[in-house]
């Protein structure tokens, strides 16, 4: 049998692991990775046992052994067991050889025997049986029984012995009647030889079966040792990954701390205070702009039915119909003309500050466009007054139309001032070089914090996996030590 000895990459260092291994756990504290209650898988400075001293080590007080040495000791135990098997089979082999010599004499005597057959019709039957028996016996005897010195020899010997048993059994069953009737004494001798060789075969099988069980135990233990070494390496790699994640988190956190300090320093400067004042004013202007939009929505909500009735019968692609739909669905848009402001969101709000300067716009077109809306509202008001639009609450609608016509010019004027002021503030803010630096630092802090969170998440998963592997390691160590100690006959603590 060939013993597979695993290649271990930790022969230079090893540490002792007892069966009562503590639980593995890691945590990151103050951005530092700490290992708690850890199974030590790094070296303790011990030298490995040399193969030549393994048996001496087993006989000394020391009951510790490395995984590679344990594999070598298993091999030596197997070699010893093979030698024991060979020694146990030698007496059986001698008995078989003696039996074959006795069988050879039986064949010779049977060949010389003058068999008396009273009835001539049986002579040929008897003679054929005798020739068959003699030929079979001599054929079996002529096959040499090889010497036994290896396991392979032992297996061949068992097969040879099985062949002899089958041969005797076949002769006894096929020629038993002829032998018992005409040469009874030979039948008795052959039966005795058959019983003897069967007993010897059973003893041989029993010895080999015992060895095969032992060999199976060795194979199972080797598998355990290989799994154990793989688990140790896996835990080592996992711990290295934990340490690496801890170091990376520490580096990133230090970087974030430095960036936060730098940002705080910048936020204390005069330029930043000016930038903050600009941002606060811009936010207030944004709030005021949203309030005007909402007031516009509220006002038009009272006259939507009148505007809708006024649009009945108009071609949908005509400019008038489009303007009427704008007043019904998005009335705040009447204040924004010719791309003066980026299109607001459908809910009437926008956070965009991509404004164009009012100087770049055609002011006449803007004014004309806004007053076109006012003209349409005046026409609707007139239609209601003249009864062209039938409404149950026409007086109430007329009142709100009057309110809209009164407030819209002031809203439009105020929004124009807000847009101009926001554009001015935007240009003023962008003139500060510090703003770009602050923005870069803030973006970097955000990215680094996201990276830290992701690494912490992976670290938690890795720690969970290590905890599971640590439990598996304890089980493997315990099983390996029990199986190994049962084979070598002495308790060992497996170290690595």
Image (cartoon, rainbow, N blue to C red):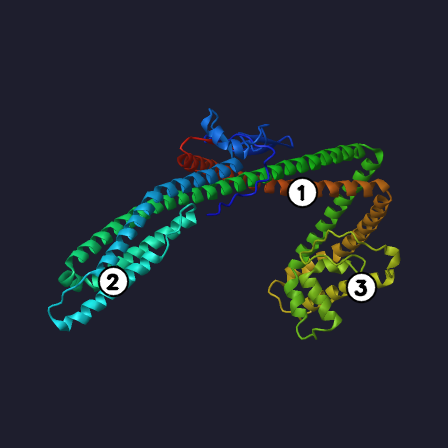
Residue 43: image location, x then y, percent:
59, 30
Q: CA distance from mark 1 to mark 2?
A: 90 Å
Q: Which residue is depicted at the point 72% across and 53% down?
A: 350
Q: In this figure, which residue is indicated by the disc labeled 1?
A: 451
Q: Which residue is depicted at the point 50% across and 32% down?
A: 54
Q: Which is more toward the observer, 119 or 379? A: 119
Q: Nearer the viewer, mark 1 or mark 3?
A: 1
Residue 261 in which image quadrant: top right
Residue 163 in which image quadrant: bottom left
Q: Which residue is depicted at the point 11% across and 71% down?
A: 119
**Which secondary structure lies at badge 2?**
helix
Residue 482 in which image quadrant: top left
Upstream in sequence: badge 1 or badge 3: 3
Instruction: Classify 413 as above or below 305.
Output: above
Q: Nearer the viewer, mark 3 or mark 2?
A: 2
Q: Nearer the viewer, mark 1 or mark 2?
A: 2
Can you name the residue that lies furthest to the right here?
359
Q: Is residue 79 left or right of residue 249?
A: left
Q: Which is more toward the observer, 300 or 127? A: 127
Q: CA distance from mark 3 to mark 2?
A: 128 Å
Q: CA distance from mark 1 to mark 3?
A: 51 Å
Q: How many marks?
A: 3
Upstream in sequence: badge 3 or badge 2: 2
Can you name the residue that lies furthest to the left here?
118
């Amino acid at each position: 049998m060939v013993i597979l000895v695993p290649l271990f990459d930790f022969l230079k260092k090893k540490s002792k692991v007892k069966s009562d291994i503590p639980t593995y756990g890691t945590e990151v504290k103050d951005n530092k990775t700490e290992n708690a209650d850890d199974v030590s898988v790094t070296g303790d400075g011990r030298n490995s046992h040399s193969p030549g001293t393994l048996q001496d080590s087993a006989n000394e007080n020391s009951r510790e052994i490395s995984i590679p040495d344990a594999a070598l000791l298993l091999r030596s135990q197997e070699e010893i067991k093979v030698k024991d098997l060979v020694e146990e089979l030698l007496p059986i082999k001698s008995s078989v050889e003696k039996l074959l010599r006795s069988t050879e004499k039986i064949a010779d005597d049977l060949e010389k025997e003058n068999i008396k057959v009273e009835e001539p019709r049986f002579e040929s039957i008897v003679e054929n049986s005798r020739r068959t028996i003699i030929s079979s016996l001599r054929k079996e005897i002529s096959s040499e029984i090889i010497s036994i010195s290896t396991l392979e020899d032992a297996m061949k010997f068992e097969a040879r012995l099985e062949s002899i048993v089958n041969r005797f059994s076949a002769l006894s069953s096929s020629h038993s009647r002829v032998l018992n009737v005409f040469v009874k004494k030979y039948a008795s001798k052959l039966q005795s030889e058959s019983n003897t060789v069967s007993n010897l075969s059973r003893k041989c099988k029993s010895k080999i079966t015992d060895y095969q069980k032992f060999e199976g135990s060795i194979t199972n233990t080797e598998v355990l040792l290989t799994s154990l070494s793989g688990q140790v390496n896996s835990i080592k790699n996992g711990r290295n990954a934990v340490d690496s994640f801890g170091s990376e988190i520490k580096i990133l956190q230090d970087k974030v701390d430095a960036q936060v300090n730098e940002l705080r320093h910048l936020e204390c400067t005069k330029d930043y205070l000016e930038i903050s004042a600009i941002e606060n004013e811009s936010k207030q202007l944004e709030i005021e702009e949203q309030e005007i939009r909402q007031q516009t929505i509220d006002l038009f909500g009272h006259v939507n039915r009148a505007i809708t009735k006024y649009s009945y019968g108009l071609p949908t692609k005509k400019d008038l119909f489009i303007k009427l739909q704008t007043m019904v669905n998005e009335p705040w848009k009447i204040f924004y003309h010719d791309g003066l402001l980026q299109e607001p969101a459908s809910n009437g709000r926008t956070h965009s500050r991509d404004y164009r300067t009012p100087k770049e716009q055609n002011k006449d077109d803007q004014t004309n466009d806004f007053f076109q809306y006012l003209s349409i509202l005046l026409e609707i008001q007139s239609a209601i007054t003249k009864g062209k639009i039938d409404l149950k609450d026409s007086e109430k609608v007329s009142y709100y139309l009057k309110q809209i016509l009164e407030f819209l010019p002031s809203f439009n004027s105020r929004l124009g001032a807000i847009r101009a002021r926001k554009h001015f503030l935007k240009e003023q803010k962008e003139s500060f070089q510090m703003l770009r630096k602050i923005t870069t630092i803030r973006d970097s802090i955000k990215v680094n914090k996201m990276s830290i969170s992701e690494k912490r998440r992976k670290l938690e998963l890795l720690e969970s996996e290590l905890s599971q592997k640590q439990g598996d390691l304890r089980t493997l160590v315990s099983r390996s030590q029990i199986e190994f100690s049962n084979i070598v006959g002495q308790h060992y603590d497996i170290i690595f």
